[in-house]
């Protein structure tokens, strides 16, 4: 299974994501909240970052399904 993909199952080799300060802070807060969860952590955890244009990046922890 691809670990970096566009559409599910469609692999890409490299991705650059440029975050605004607010988007970076949202990601930090989401990752911190996940890291502080008591085990067992929620399987399939993921978070979404939307930019002002409605484009979305999904960050997931775990193996692709």
Image (tube, grey):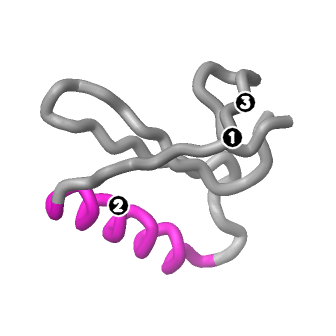
Q: Residues within 10 Å of mark 2 (few under 14, many from 20)?
A: some
Locate residue 54 relative to residue 4 in the image: left or right: left
Mark 3 lies on a secondary structure that is loop
- For residue 64, above or below residue 31: above
Counting from the top left corner in percent of width and height, residue 18 is at 31, 51
Q: Is residue 1 above or below residue 32?
A: above
- Quadrant in which the C terminus is drawn: top right
**Can you identify the residue that label 3 sits on?**
11
Is 31 above or below relative to 22?
Answer: below
Q: In percent of the image, x 38 and y 62: which residue is there?
A: 30
Q: Residue at x 59, y 49 (%)?
A: 60
Q: Which residue is mark 1?
A: 13
The kind of secondary structure element at disc 2 is helix
Q: Is residue 30 magenta?
A: yes
Residue 17, magenta (yes or no): no
> Percent x, y for residue 64?
77, 40
Please tell me whether the stretch drawn in magenta is mainly helix, strand or loop: helix
Callout 1: helix, strand or loop? loop
In the image, which residues are magenta?
A: 21-38
């Amino acid at each position: 299974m691809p670990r970096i993909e566009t559409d599910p199952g469609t692999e890409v080799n490299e991705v650059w994501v440029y975050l605004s300060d607010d988007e970076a802070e949202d990601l930090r807060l989401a990752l911190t909240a996940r890291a502080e969860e008591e085990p067992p952590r929620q399987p399939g955890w993921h978070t979404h970052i939307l930019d002002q244009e409605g484009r979305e990046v999904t960050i997931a922890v775990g193996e692709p399904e």
